[in-house]
Image (cartoon, rainbow, N blue to C red):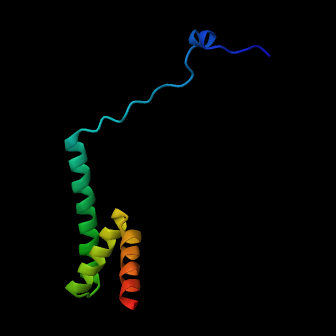
Amino acid sequence: MLPVTTKSLANQPTLMKNHSRLPLRPWMVLVGVVVLIAGHGIIVYYVSSHVALSVTVMAGLTLLVVIKHLGLLGPLYALFRRRSRRNDR
């Protein structure tokens, strides 16, 4: 087996290309966020028009979906567990 040195590797063509980041323009991100929020709003409007739910229930479900989307459900659950343990003592 031949020893491999960095000098011999320098002359070799590269096998992997460096992929550049996708060119995200600020206005494209803004349009994406607006479309995402509008899509969720349309779904909520459609569901609320077909199911008779109170505003409180819809607000609670919306808050739960936002918390779940942001990934805050685990830390929020841990906070409530810590508080309940502290109150039990």
Q: Position of residue 8 (x, y in %)?
A: 63, 10
Residue visible at 21% across and 42% down in the picture = 26
Residue visible at 22% across and 49% down in the picture = 31
Answer with the quarter of the image where residue 21 lies: top left
| Looking at the image, residue 88 lies above or below residue 58 | below
- Residue 58 versus residue 89: which sits nearer the camera? 89
- Residue 85 versus residue 64: which sits nearer the camera? 85
Please identify the residue farthest to the front as the structure is shown: 89
Q: How many marks?
A: 0
Q: Position of residue 57 (x, y in %)?
A: 26, 85
Answer with the quarter of the image where residue 83 lies: bottom left
| Looking at the image, residue 74 lies above or below residue 20 | below
Q: Position of residue 7 (x, y in %)?
A: 60, 9
Answer with the quarter of the image where residue 2 lies: top right
Please identify the residue farthest to the bottom as the structure is shown: 88
Residue visible at 27% across and 74% down in the picture = 63
Please identify the residue farthest to the right as the structure is shown: 1
> Which image quadrant: the N terminus?
top right
Q: Position of residue 37 (x, y in %)?
A: 24, 61
Residue visible at 28% across and 39% down in the picture = 24
> Which image quadrant: the C terminus?
bottom left
Q: Locate residue 53 relative to residue 17 in the image: left or right.
A: left
| Looking at the image, residue 36 lies above or below residue 65 | above
